[in-house]
Amino acid sequence: MLFGGVVQVNPAESRTPVMADVARLAGVSHQTVSRVVNGHPNVREETVLRVRRAIDELGYHRNSTARALVTRRTNTLGVIAFDTTLFGPAQTLAGIERAAREAGYFLSMVSLDDVSPDGVATAADYLIQQSVEGCVAIAPQRSLVEALAALSGPRPLVTVEGGEGSGLPVVCVDQVQGARDAVHHLLGLGHTTVHHIEGDPLWLESEARVVGWRRALEEAGAPVPEPLQGDWSPRSGYELAFSLVERRAAGERVTAIFVGNDQMAIGVLRALHEAGLNVPGDVSVVGFDDVPEAEYLTPSLTTVYQDFAQVGRESLALLLGEIDRNGSADRIARRVVPARLRVRGSSGPPPP
C-alpha cells in the first residue's frame, strides 16, 4: 500500500520463512514440522503431505547454522591434499569428493604447497574454523604424515597413502603387491631381471613400489640392479631411459623396465622409440596407475591399476565410522585396496 510516496511492506511477507511459519500454514506443531524435515518415520502420511505443501508454498529452507547448533553436526568434512596436479592425488581427491557427495556431505578442502609443520598447522586451523566433523588427508610424503600426527585437531583424521606407524587411521592401495605383480609378470615372460625407474623418493608410494620390485626379484633369485630416481614427470622417465639405453649399448642386458608411474613410462616409451628400440620386441615396459591414455598409446601400456573410487569410498566409510564412534575405542584402523595388473601391448618375451 502507498502512503505519501512510500511503499509500506509487511515484515512477515518480506522476511525468510522459518519453521514456525510452516507449522502455522500446515496447522501442525513446530515439533511435527521438525520430524517431517528430518525424515522421522512416526508421522502420518497425510500430515507429511500437508507439511511438504506448506514448505513448497513458503519456499522454506532449513537453517543449516541453527541445525548445527542443535545437532552438533555440520555435514561438512575437511580434506588436506598435496600436489593434486599429479594423476594419483587428483584421482584420489575426486574419489573422496564423489563418496562424500553420495553420503550427503560437503567438503572443505585445503591444497598444500608447504608440507612443513607450520604449513600443515595453518591448513588444520582453517578446517577447524569451518567446523568440519572430521578430515581426510591425502598424505603421500612421510614429512606430511608426521606433521599431521603431531596435530591436536581436526579429529577424527584419516590419512590416504599415509604409510604405517603414524598412529593415524589409514586407507591405501597395496603398492607393494602391485609392484610385485608387475615384476613377476615380466620375469614370467622370461626376462632375467627387471630394471626400475622409481618416482620421487620422498613419496611413500614410491618407497613401497621399490620394496615390491626388490622383493619380487629377490624371491626369484634374480639380479637386483640399482634403481634410477625419477620425479614422476615424463621428462625424468625420458632422460633416465636414455641412460639405460647407453648401458644396453655398453653390453648390459636391459630387456625389461618397471616404471614407477605411467607419466614416466610415457617418457620411457618415447626415448626407446627415438633410440630405435622396439617395445616390447627389444625392451618391455610396465607402468603404474593406469592413466586413461595408457590403453591408447602405441603400444598400449601394461600397467598396474589403482581403484581410486574405491579408495574414496573406503576413506569416507572409515572417517564416518570414526566420527560415529567418537573415539570410544582405542584402535588404529587400516584398510588396504588391492592393485591389479593390466596386461597390454608393451610387455612381451625378451629378445633371443
Image (cartoon, rainbow, N blue to C red):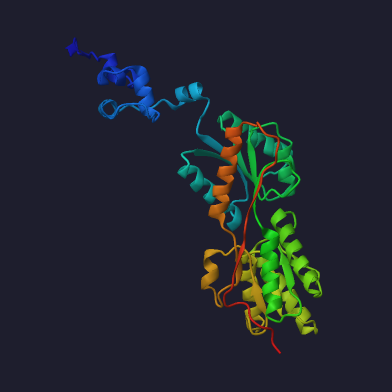
Residue at horizontal 62%, vertical 51%? 83
Residue at horizontal 58%, vertical 51%? 311
Residue at horizontal 72%, vertical 54%? 204
Query: Which of the 4 quarters of the picture holds residue 331?
Result: top right
| Quarter occupied by the C terminus | bottom right
Left or right: 313 in relation to 122: left
x, y percent for residue 55: 29, 27
**Which residue sits furthest top?**
4
Against 113, residue 22 (above or below) is above
Against 48, residue 162 (above or below) is below
Query: Which of the 4 quarters of the picture holds residue 289?
Result: bottom right
Q: Is residue 200 visible?
A: no
Q: Is residue 98 visible?
A: yes
x, y percent for residue 248: 76, 82
x, y percent for residue 74: 51, 30
x, y percent for residue 117: 73, 38
Against 218, residue 11 (above or below) is above
Q: Nearer the viewer, residue 74 or 124?
A: 74
| Quarter occupied by the N terminus | top left
